[in-house]
Image: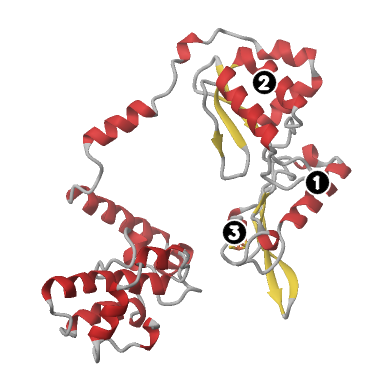
Amino acid sequence: MDWEYIEPSDNPYDFCSWFNSTDIELCSDDCVDEEVLCILYEFSDICFDCVDNQNCDDVTLWDEVDECHDSDDGGDDGTDCYSGWYDCLGVCDNKHRARIKILIDELGLNEARRQIYEHYNSLKNESRLPSTDIIKFLMDEFSPPDFSTAKEHDLEKDFIRSLSLKNWAETNLTSHHDPNHVIVSVSLKKPGATPGDATAKQMRVLADLAQQYAYDELCVSHEQNIILPHVPKEHVVKIYNKLDEADLATSNIGMVSDIISCPGMDYCKLATARSIPIAKQIATRFCELKTERDIGPLKIKISGCINACGHHHVGHIGILGLDRRGVENYQITEVQKIFS
Ligand code: SF4
């Protein structure tokens, strides 16, 4: 039985018997249609109410469900369509408009910011924030390492001995708040390779480096690279050498070839165009031209459809793949003024 063809207010019991015999969690697991999810969760409340109170023929209950698809604002009365600010105000009746960026565009940035703070304060007042015990547990679990154990070390002397190390350090090292440490960014953007990919062997090397030299900590960045957030300066040369051996010493963080690319049509069933081959070609081209350092920091981001997982709309140059009458097209969606 399909929920779309049931008129609940006419015959709520038919629907309820279907609903109660359906594994809703399983049903919603693979569902990406926000309107359907919204309705399913509304029904789950109503049907439990029905079971408990035998009042399913109270047609006013069904009006709540109607808010999922009948109103423009997707249920601004706090229905369980989603949780949080966007969840209260976001559009869930039209999957093409169900985006935070569209809501912000309609409200304006200042109004959106005001509402987010208002919502945040209301959550605080309702004591929906985690308890102090949970916050303490998290603080203990994620407390920073003891930086005082690191020795003083002059990296400049290492750079004099190795030009390749110096070049790599220029792009891949960032200063740390502790003077005896640096942040190491490991590039997964070797020109010509798939952005963000690492082999199993490379991942083991990275895990070993984190364990031996970086307080057992590494992060995967949204820019599809690996970060060792706390590295004592005395270990930088050892880390660089190991990365070099593992083909992981690409020195291009923040440069033209450090492209964020979504999986696109190679892997993603929502894609309307390929992203990875475009990223590979751009990176290879600039590598051949040897102009990356002259150009300097430049963020290119590629998405294979309007869902924008590659964040193309916030790149210096954003590339959006679109299907036009069955042909892959690419649209430069935004070029920021970066040379001023
Ligand atoms: S932007 Fe589109 S194609 Fe790329 S990963 Fe997201 S949904 Fe898939």
Checking the image for residue 192, the label placed there is 1
The answer to whether the beta carbon of the residue marked 1 is less than 8 Å from any atom of ligand 1 is no
Q: Earlier in the sequence, mark 2 or mark 3?
A: 2
Q: Position of residue 74 (x, y in %)?
A: 34, 73
Q: CA distance from mark 2 to mark 1?
A: 24 Å
In-image side of 315 versus 177 (left or right): right
Can residue 319 be seen in the rendering of this structure? no
133 or 19, nearer to the observer: 19
Residue 219 figure quarter: top right
Which residue of the protein is positioned furthest toward the front in this rendering?
Answer: 21
SS for dot 1:
loop
Query: What amino acid is at disc 3?
Result: His
Marks 2 and 1: CB-CB under 8 Å? no
Which residue of the protein is positioned furthest toward the right in this rendering?
Answer: 288
Checking the image for residue 239, the label placed there is 2
The residue shown at (37%, 82%) is 3
